C-alpha cells in the first residue's frame, strides 16, 4: 500500500473533520467525550492547524492558540457543559445576557452559569469555526486534567492553590503573584517565563478591553474543573446541541435575504436605483478616508500631508467626525438590522468634490458628472456567508411588489489573506480561487494588475486558496498548494464564495458577462512561517500602506473611464 504524504494525510483529516461535523449537525447533538467527539479531536490533531500551535503535544498547554480562541469566543465558554447552536431564537425580551466576543461578530447568550447559546446568522463557516474552537478547548482541558490529577493522591497541590486564587477576589502582587505563576507553569507544562508572559498578556488584555474574557487563572481553573466534574457524573458531560431551526437554515439565505432587501430599499429610497453601482467588500474606514480624508483635515484647519499614508495616520480616532463631514458630500451609512453583522456604506461620487481628495488620487470629474457612479461598500462577510449575501444582493429586488433591477457595474473584493510566498503587508492579486475540500475552482478575470500599483511594492499574482475556516489550515497542505502546479500565492475564506455568486448571477442573467471583477488582498500573516500565523497578532500600523494602496487603486478604477473607452 502506497504511503500517503504529510499533505495528503492532512487533507484527508480536514475532509474527515468536515464530514463528521456535517453529520453531527444533522444528528442534532454530540459529546466531545463520546465516540464522535473523539473522532473530531483525532482529526483536528492529525492535520495540526497552524493557528493552534502545539495543540498536538500532550505535555504542554497551547497558550497562544488559547488566547486566539478566547478572543473569538464568549466570556465563560471555558466552564460551560451545555452549548446550543441555533438559528432562530428571540432573546431580546429575556434576562439572558448577550455576549459579543472581542474579535468575532458573533451572537451568543448566557442562559445559565454552565449553558450558552449561539445564534448562527453567518452559515456553515461559523458553525465549523465554533466546533473547531470547542474541540481545541476540550483537548487543552484534558491536558490540564492529566497534569493535575494523580491516581495516588487525587488532585495536585498546585491545583489546590489555583482553586484558592480563583475563589479569592483580591489581586495578587509581589511574591504571592510569582508563586502563583510558578504553580500555574507546572499545571501548563510551561516554563515560568512562558506562563508569566501569557498571564500578563491575558491580564492586560482582560482589563484593557472591558472584560471580554476572564483572567488566565480563572480560564485554566474552569477548564480543568469542567473535566473533573465530567469524571464524577455523566450528567456533567459537555454536550453540543444543533437545534432543528439550525438544520433547516443550512442551504437557505434567511439572514442574507433580509440584509439584501434592506440594502436595496435603502438605495431605492436614496433615488439611486437607476445609477451604475460598484460593490466593494472592504473594511468600514478606508474608502471613507480616501474620499473625504483630505477635505476633513482642511475643514478642521489642519495641514494635509503630501504623503497619502501620512495623511491616513492623522485621521485616526476621528471616524465619527469624518462620517459627519462626509454626509454633506454623498456619504450615507446603513447599520445592519438583519443580524447578518454586515454594515453598508453608500458613496454617491457625484456629490463629492476635488477638494476632499488627496492630491495623489487620480479622478476624472467629467466622467463622474456623466456616469454618476455609486460605490456600495459592504463590511467583511465570514466564509460561506459571502455567497449568501452577494447572491441575494445581485438578485433583482421587489419593492411594494414592483421589480427593481440595479445596474451592477463591478464587484470589488478587498480583503486580508495569508500569503504563501511573501511577508506580512505584501499584496496578492487573484487569478483564480481554489476551493479547499471541494472540486470547485473559479478562474478570475481580474481587472487589477501589478502595473496599477506603486513600483517596487511586493505584489504576488496567482491562484488564491479559499479555505474552510481560520482554524482548518495545515502547513503541509498550504505548502503543497504553493509548490505544486497550483502555484497558489495566498489563502483566505471568502473569495471563492463571492466568485461562485458572481458566476451564478452571470448564468441567471442578473449581471452582464463582462462585469468588472477586481480581487486584491493584503497579507495579514504567513502560515508557512512559525510565529507568523494569525495568532501572532494584527498588522497594526504596517497594515496602512497595503490597505490604502488597494483602496486607492479600486477607487481610481471606478471614477475614471475604462481603458477601452479612452
Image (cartoon, grey):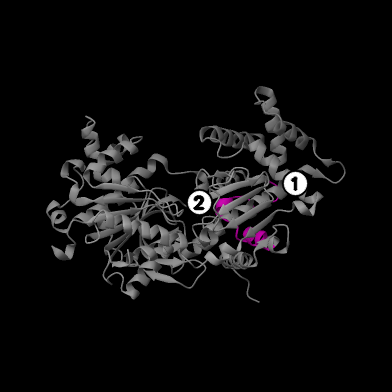
* Separation of residues labelled 1 and 2 (CA atoms): 31 Å
Q: Which mark is residue 24?
A: none
Residue under pointer 1: 145
For marks 1 and 2, give the one nearer the viewer. 1
Where residue 132 sits in the image (x, y, percent)?
59, 56
Please give the count of numbered marks on the rendered protein: 2
Write the start and end of the magenta stretch as one range.
39-60
In this rendered view, identify the residue nearer to me: 337 or 490.
337
- Whether the magenta-drawn stretch holds residue 56 is answered as yes
The answer to whether one can see residue 307 in this image is: no
Residue found at x 61% / y 67%: 26
In this rendered view, identify the residue nearer to me: 181 or 166.
166
In this rendered view, identify the residue nearer to me: 226 or 15.
226
| Mark found first going from the N terminus, 1 or 2 | 1
In the rendered view, does 291 fall on the left or right side of 50?
Answer: left
Residue under pointer 2: 529
Where residue 362 sits in the image (x, y, percent)?
18, 49
Residue found at x 71% / y 31%: 165
Residue found at x 23% / y 47%: 330
Quadrant assignment for the N terminus:
bottom right
- Whether the magenta-drawn stretch holds residue 531 is answered as no
Amino acid at each position: 500500500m502506497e504511503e500517503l504524504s504529510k499533505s495528503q494525510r492532512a487533507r484527508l483529516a480536514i475532509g474527515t473533520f468536515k464530514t463528521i461535523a456535517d453529520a453531527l449537525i444533522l444528528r442534532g447533538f454530540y459529546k466531545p467525550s463520546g465516540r464522535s467527539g473523539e473522532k473530531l479531536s483525532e482529526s483536528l490533531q492529525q492535520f495540526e492547524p497552524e493557528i493552534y500551535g502545539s495543540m498536538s503535544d500532550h505535555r504542554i498547554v497551547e497558550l497562544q492558540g488559547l488566547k486566539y480562541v478566547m478572543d473569538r469566543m464568549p466570556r465563560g465558554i471555558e466552564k460551560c457543559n451545555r452549548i446550543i447552536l441555533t438559528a432562530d431564537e428571540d432573546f431580546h425580551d429575556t434576562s439572558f445576557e448577550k455576549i459579543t466576543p472581542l474579535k468575532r461578530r458573533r451572537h451568543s447568550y448566557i442562559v445559565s452559569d454552565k449553558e450558552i447559546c449561539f445564534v448562527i446568522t453567518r452559515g456553515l463557516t461559523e458553525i465549523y469555526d465554533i466546533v473547531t474552537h470547542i474541540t481545541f478547548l476540550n483537548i487543552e482541558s484534558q491536558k490540564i486534567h492529566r497534569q493535575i490529577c494523580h491516581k495516588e493522591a487525587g488532585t495536585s497541590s498546585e491545583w489546590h492553590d489555583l482553586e484558592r486564587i480563583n475563589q479569592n477576589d483580591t489581586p495578587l502582587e509581589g511574591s504571592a503573584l510569582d508563586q502563583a505563576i510558578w504553580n500555574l507553569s507546572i499545571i501548563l507544562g510551561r516554563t515560568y517565563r512562558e506562563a508569566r508572559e501569557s498571564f500578563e498578556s491575558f491580564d492586560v488584555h482582560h482589563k484593557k478591553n472591558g472584560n471580554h474574557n476572564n483572567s488566565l487563572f480563572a480560564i485554566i481553573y474552569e477548564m480543568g474543573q469542567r473535566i473533573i466534574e465530567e469524571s464524577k457524573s455523566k450528567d456533567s458531560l459537555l454536550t453540543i446541541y444543533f437545534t432543528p431551526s439550525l438544520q433547516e437554515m443550512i442551504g437557505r439565505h434567511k439572514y442574507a435575504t433580509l440584509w439584501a432587501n434592506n440594502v436595496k430599499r435603502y438605495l431605492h429610497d436614496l433615488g439611486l436605483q437607476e445609477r451604475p453601482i460598484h460593490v466593494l467588500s472592504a473594511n468600514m474606514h478606508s474608502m471613507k478616508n480616501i474620499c473625504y480624508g483630505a477635505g476633513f483635515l482642511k475643514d478642521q484647519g489642519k495641514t494635509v500631508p503630501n504623503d497619502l499614508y501620512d495623511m491616513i495616520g492623522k485621521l485616526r480616532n476621528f471616524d465619527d467626525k469624518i462620517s459627519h463631514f462626509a454626509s454633506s458630500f454623498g456619504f450615507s451609512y446603513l447599520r445592519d438590522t438583519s443580524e447578518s453583522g454586515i454594515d453598508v456604506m453608500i458613496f454617491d461620487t457625484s456629490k463629492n468634490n476635488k477638494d476632499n481628495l488627496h492630491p495623489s488620487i487620480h479622478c476624472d470629474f467629467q466622467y463622474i458628472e456623466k456616469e454618476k457612479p455609486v460605490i456600495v461598500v459592504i463590511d467583511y462577510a465570514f466564509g460561506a456567508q459571502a455567497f449568501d449575501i452577494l447572491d441575494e444582493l445581485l438578485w433583482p429586488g421587489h419593492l411594494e411588489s414592483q421589480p427593481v433591477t440595479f445596474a451592477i457595474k463591478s464587484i470589488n473584493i478587498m480583503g486580508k489573506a495569508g500569503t504563501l510566498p511573501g511577508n506580512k503587508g505584501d499584496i496578492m492579486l487573484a487569478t483564480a480561487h481554489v476551493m479547499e475540500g471541494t472540486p470547485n475552482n473559479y478562474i478570475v478575470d481580474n481587472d487589477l494588475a501589478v502595473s496599477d500599483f506603486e513600483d517596487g511594492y511586493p505584489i504576488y499574482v496567482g491562484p488564491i486558496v479559499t479555505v474552510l475556516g481560520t482554524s482548518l489550515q495545515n502547513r503541509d497542505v498550504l505548502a503543497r498548494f504553493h509548490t505544486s502546479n497550483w502555484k497558489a500565492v495566498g489563502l483566505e475564506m471568502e473569495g471563492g464564495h463571492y466568485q461562485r455568486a458572481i458566476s451564478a448571477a452571470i448564468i441567471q442573467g442578473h449581471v452582464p458577462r463582462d462585469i468588472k471583477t477586481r480581487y486584491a488582498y493584503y497579507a495579514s500573516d504567513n502560515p508557512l512561517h512559525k510565529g507568523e500565523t494569525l495568532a501572532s497578532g494584527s498588522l497594526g500600523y504596517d497594515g496602512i500602506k497595503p490597505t490604502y494602496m488597494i483602496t486607492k487603486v479600486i477607487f481610481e478604477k471606478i471614477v475614471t473611464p475604462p481603458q477601452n473607452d479612452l
